[in-house]
Image: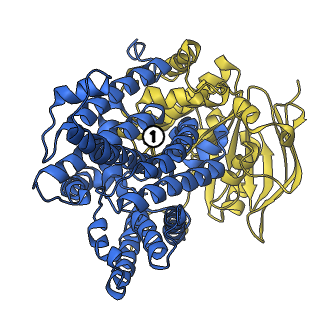
C-alpha cells in the first residue's frame, strides 16, 4: 500500500520541526548580533551568551542595548505578521491574503498615528489605537468584499488596494499637516522602522503574542477543515463563526500592536507561509508554528540586511521585504493565479 | 426495524418565504433514497437540515428515535456525513490528508490522529479505490476521483448515514455509473443508509430503493422509483414534457426529455 508510510502529522513531527526552526532562529539571532557598523566577533557573542566571558563595556552596550532589543522585536513582528498571513489565508480561503495586502497594516498605522497626533502617547494608548485600526480594517475589508455572499478573491484584493490607498492618504495628511517633529520621522516608519526598539515593547507584546498564538494553534485542525469549505467544516462540528471571530480579533490585536512599534512591513505574511507550505505541506498543525518561527527568522534577517547593506546609513526594513515580496506576489499570481481567482 | 431517520412536518425558511413546508418521510436502514426535484425545490436545504447545520423552526427530526436537536454537533457528525457537491481546497492538501480529516469528530482535545485513525482512513480509501491517489494533491484530481475521495472522507467519519449532494453533476457517464456503483456496494457491505440528490433521474432510478420528488418545498411523491417517476409526475413538477418508459434491462423507469416542440429534431 502506497501511503501507508504516510502517518499524517504527528506531535513528534511538529516538535522536531519546531526545534529545528528554533535552532535556525537562534543561529540567525547570533549572527545578526555580530553584524553592524561596530564589529563584535561571533565568538565573543557566543561566549557571552552562554555565560562564559564578558564583553567589553562598549561591545556590551551595542549588543545588549541596541542590537538585541531590535533583533528580538524584529522576531516578534515577523512572527506575528507571518501568523497573520497564515490565518487570513485559511479563513478567507485565499492564498494571497496577508495583513499588508488586505490593508490591515495601514489601518493599524492610521490608528497609531491618530494616537500620536492626538496625544495618546501614554503607555498603551498607541498600541491600543493601532489594534482598533487593524480590527476596523478587517471588518471593513470583509464587509465590503463579502456583499455577494462568499468572499471572492479578486474583490478581496481590490478592496485591500483601495483601503490601502485611502489609509496611506490619511497618514500622509496627518504627516503633512502637523508640526509635530516626531511625525516627520514617521515617513521612515511608513516603510517599517525597527531602529527605535525598546525592551518595554517586548514585554508588552510578548505575552499577548503567546496567548493569541496558543489560541490560534488550538484552532489549527479547524482551519484545515475551513480551507476545504465552510459547509463541510460546519458539518464536521467546527464552530466556524467562533473560530473566525476569535481569530480575526486575535490577529488584529497582535498585528495592531506590533505595527504600532515597527511601522508598516509588507509581504512577510505572504512570503513565509508560502515557502513553509511548499516545504512542509498545508496542514495547519505544522504550518502555523513553522510559519510563525519562520517569520521571525525572515524578518530578523531582513532587518539585519536593512541596517547593514548601506552602512552607516540604514534602509527601512519594509523596503527589503517589499523588494523580495512584490516579485514573489507577482510570481504567485502568474504561477497559480488562474486557479486561485475562480471562486 | 426502526428507521434511521424520521422527519415529521419539517418547515424551514431563510427569510420570509418558507422553502420547506411540512416535509414528512423516513430513511430506512440500508436503503438508498434518491432525492429529486427541480432547481430551488429545497433539496440542498433539506440535506443541510438533516445534517443539523440549519436549525428548523417547526417540525421534528428523529435520528435513531431521538430528536436531532438533543444531539451535540460532534455526535451528529459521528452519525451523519455529508459529501458536498464540490469541494475546492485552495491549498495542496494530499488525498490522504483530506481523507484523514474525516476523523475530526472523533478526536478529543489532543489534536493529532493516531494509528487507529490512519488505519480507518486507509480502509476507507481501499473501499473507494483511492489508495493509489493517497499522495496526490486533491486539487490535481479529476471530478470523479475527487468525489471518490470525498466519499472516502465520509466513510472515515464512520457515520451510518451518508448524504450526497449531486455527486454526479459534473461527471461524464462512465464516472456517474462508477459513483452510483460505489454507493450501492457501500450500502450493502457497510450497512449504510444513503440520501442522494441527483439530476440523473434514470440512472438514480436503477440504484435507489425509493425516491422522493420534492416540489416547491413539499414532498410531491415518495415511493419506489416506478411509482414516483411517471410521465405525469415528472412533467408536472419539472414543467417539461417527458416520456417515461421502462429500461428493458433493469426494468426501472427510464426518462426521456422531449423537445418542447414535441416534433423531433427542431429545424428552422
Q: Nearer the viewer, residue B82 or A290?
A: A290
- Residue A210, compared with residue B242, is above or below; it is above
Q: Quadrant of the N terminus of chain A?
A: top left
Q: Which chain is blue?
A: A
Residue A105 can be seen, yes or no: yes
**Chain bearing mark 1:** B
The residue located at (66%, 30%) in the rendering is: B105
Estimate the x, y position of residue B163 in percent, counting from the top left. Answer: 66, 38
Estimate the x, y position of residue B15 in percent, counting from the top left. Answer: 75, 69
| Mark 1 closeness class: few <14, some 14–19, many ≥20 residues within 10 Å | few
Determine the image quadrant of residue B42.
bottom right
* Coloration mode: by chain
Residue identifier under label 1: B173
Residue B133 can be seen, yes or no: no
The residue located at (27%, 45%) in the rendering is: A67
Instruction: Label 1: state its secondary structure.
Output: helix
Estimate the x, y position of residue A176 in percent, counting from the top left. Answer: 32, 85
Q: Nearer the viewer, residue B69 or B126?
A: B69
The residue located at (27%, 64%) in the rendering is: A191
- Residue B125, compared with residue A212, is above or below; it is above
Query: In the displayed image of the protein, which residue is found farthest to the front?
Result: A57
Q: Total label count? A: 1
Q: Nearer the viewer, residue B47 or A251?
A: A251
Estimate the x, y position of residue A308 in percent, counting from the top left. Answer: 14, 50
Q: Quadrant of the C terminus of chain A?
A: bottom left
Q: Nearer the viewer, residue A46 or B4?
A: A46
- Residue A5, compared with residue A192, is above or below; it is above
Left or right, residue B65 beside residue A176? right
Q: Colour of chain B?
A: yellow
Determine the image quadrant of residue B57.
bottom right
Amino acid at each position: 500500500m502506497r501511503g501507508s508510510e504516510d502517518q499524517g502529522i504527528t506531535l513528534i513531527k511538529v516538535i522536531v520541526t519546531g526545534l529545528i526552526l528554533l535552532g535556525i532562529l537562534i543561529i540567525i539571532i547570533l549572527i545578526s548580533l555580530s553584524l553592524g557598523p561596530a564589529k563584535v566577533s561571533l565568538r565573543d557573542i557566543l561566549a557571552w551568551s552562554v555565560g562564559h566571558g564578558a564583553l567589553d563595556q562598549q561591545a556590551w552596550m551595542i549588543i545588549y542595548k541596541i542590537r538585541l532589543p531590535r533583533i528580538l522585536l524584529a522576531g516578534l513582528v515577523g512572527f506575528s505578521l507571518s501568523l497573520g498571513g497564515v490565518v487570513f489565508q485559511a479563513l478567507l480561503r485565499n492564498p494571497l491574503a496577508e495583513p499588508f495586502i488586505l490593508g490591515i497594516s495601514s489601518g493599524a498605522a492610521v490608528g497609531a498615528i491618530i494616537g500620536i497626533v492626538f496625544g495618546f502617547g501614554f503607555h498603551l494608548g498607541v498600541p491600543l489605537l493601532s489594534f482598533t485600526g487593524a480590527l476596523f480594517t478587517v471588518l471593513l475589508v470583509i464587509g465590503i468584499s463579502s456583499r455577494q455572499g462568499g468572499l471572492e478573491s479578486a474583490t478581496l484584493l481590490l478592496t485591500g488596494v483601495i483601503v490601502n490607498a485611502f489609509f496611506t492618504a490619511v497618514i500622509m495628511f496627518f504627516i503633512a499637516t502637523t508640526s509635530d517633529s516626531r511625525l516627520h520621522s514617521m515617513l521612515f516608519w511608513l516603510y517599517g522602522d525597527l531602529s527605535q526598539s525598546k525592551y518595554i515593547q517586548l514585554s508588552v507584546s510578548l505575552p499577548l503574542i503567546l496567548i493569541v498564538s496558543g489560541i490560534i494553534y488550538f484552532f489549527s485542525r479547524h482551519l484545515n477543515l475551513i480551507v476545504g469549505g465552510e459547509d463541510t467544516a460546519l458539518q464536521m462540528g467546527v464552530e466556524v463563526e467562533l473560530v473566525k471571530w476569535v481569530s480575526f480579533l486575535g490577529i488584529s490585536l497582535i498585528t495592531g500592536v506590533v505595527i504600532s512599534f515597527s511601522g508598516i512591513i509588507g509581504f512577510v505574511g505572504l512570503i513565509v507561509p508560502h515557502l513553509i507550505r511548499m516545504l512542509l505541506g498545508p496542514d495547519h498543525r505544522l504550518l502555523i508554528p513553522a510559519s510563525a518561527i519562520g517569520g521571525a527568522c525572515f524578518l530578523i534577517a531582513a532587518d539585519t540586511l536593512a541596517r547593514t547593506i548601506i552602512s552607516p546609513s540604514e534602509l527601512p526594513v519594509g523596503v527589503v521585504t517589499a523588494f523580495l515580496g512584490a516579485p514573489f506576489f507577482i510570481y504567485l499570481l502568474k504561477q497559480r493565479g488562474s486557479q486561485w481567482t475562480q471562486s | 426495524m426502526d428507521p434511521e431517520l424520521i422527519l415529521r412536518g419539517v418547515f424551514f425558511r431563510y427569510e420570509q418565504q418558507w422553502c420547506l413546508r411540512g416535509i414528512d418521510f423516513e430513511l430506512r436502514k440500508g436503503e438508498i433514497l434518491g432525492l429529486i426535484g427541480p432547481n430551488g425545490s429545497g433539496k440542498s436545504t433539506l440535506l443541510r437540515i438533516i445534517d443539523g447545520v440549519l436549525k428548523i423552526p417547526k417540525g421534528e427530526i428523529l435520528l435513531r428515535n431521538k430528536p436531532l436537536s438533543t444531539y451535540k454537533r460532534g455526535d451528529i457528525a459521528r452519525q451523519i456525513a455529508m459529501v458536498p457537491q464540490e469541494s475546492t481546497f485552495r491549498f495542496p492538501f494530499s488525498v490522504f490528508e483530506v481523507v484523514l480529516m474525516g476523523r475530526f469528530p472523533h478526536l478529543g482535545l489532543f489534536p493529532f490522529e493516531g494509528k487507529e485513525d490512519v488505519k480507518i482512513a486507509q480502509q476507507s480509501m481501499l473501499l473507494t479505490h483511492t489508495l493509489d491517489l493517497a499522495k496526490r494533491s486533491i486539487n490535481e484530481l479529476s471530478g470523479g476521483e475527487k468525489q471518490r475521495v470525498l466519499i472516502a472522507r465520509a466513510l472515515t467519519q464512520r457515520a451510518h448515514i451518508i448524504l450526497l449532494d449531486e455527486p454526479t453533476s459534473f461527471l461524464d457517464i462512465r464516472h456517474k455509473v462508477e459513483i452510483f456503483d460505489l454507493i450501492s456496494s457501500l450500502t450493502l457491505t457497510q450497512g449504510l443508509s444513503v440520501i442522494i440528490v441527483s439530476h440523473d433521474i434514470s440512472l438514480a432510478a436503477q440504484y435507489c430503493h425509493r425516491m422522493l420528488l420534492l416540489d416547491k418545498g413539499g414532498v410531491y411523491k415518495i415511493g419506489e422509483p416506478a411509482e414516483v417517476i411517471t410521465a405525469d409526475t415528472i412533467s408536472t413538477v419539472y414543467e417539461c414534457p417527458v416520456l417515461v418508459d421502462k429500461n428493458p434491462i433493469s426494468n426501472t423507469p427510464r426518462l426521456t426529455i422531449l423537445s418542447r416542440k414535441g416534433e423531433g429534431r427542431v429545424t428552422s
